[in-house]
Image (cartoon, rainbow, N blue to C red):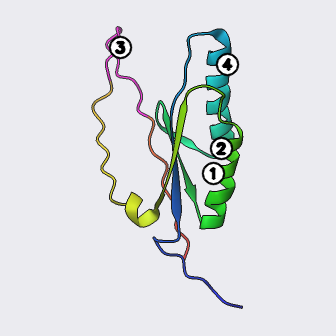
Amino acid sequence: MTLVRLNAYHIMWLFVFFDLPVTTKKERHDSALFRKNLEKDGFSMMQFSVYVRHCGSYESLDVHLNRVKSFVPKYGMVSILSVTDKQYSNIHNFRGEPKNSKSGKKKKVISEPIQLELF
């Protein structure tokens, strides 16, 4: 049995960027369905029109890439980007303070999940 050591160049991240029309009821429905399908497939919302998913291998990436392609709406723009875990480790995220609501209370910030690493 050959063991393959996981490294930051084999583990992948899949990004889906999209700009979908939402002027008609059908377009809003298609846009919402696209988001729901991304979430069903294990994607997390990074920003409103940016979703990201961790893939443990190139094979896993291909499965999810093809799945996303299968439910892309007829209209709008969808871009898919894959990067290695090593490349993703160079990301810089900046988050401002939660915006105050009219009541003066701060909105709750959703914490990012902790990634589990197994060796």
Please name the residue that numbered disc 2 is placed on: 68
Task: Indicate the secondary structure of the residue bearing disc 4.
Answer: helix
Q: Amino acid at mark 2?
A: Val
Residue 5 shown left or right of residue 83 in the figure: right
Which label sits in the foreground, 3 or 2? 2
**CA distance for labels 1 and 2:** 5 Å
Viewer-proximal residue among 73 and 50: 73
Residue 101 circle label: 3
Residue position marked by numbered label 4 in the rendering: 29
Q: Considering only order in the chain, which callout, 1 or 3, is on the residue closer to the N terminus?
A: 1
Residue type pointed to by label 3:
Ser
**Magenta stretch?**
99-109
**Cα–Cα span, label 3 and label 4:** 28 Å
- Tell me where residue 110 appears, x and y as whole percent: 45, 36
Does residue 3 appear in this view? yes
Residue named by callout 1: 65
Percent x, y of residue 58: 60, 66
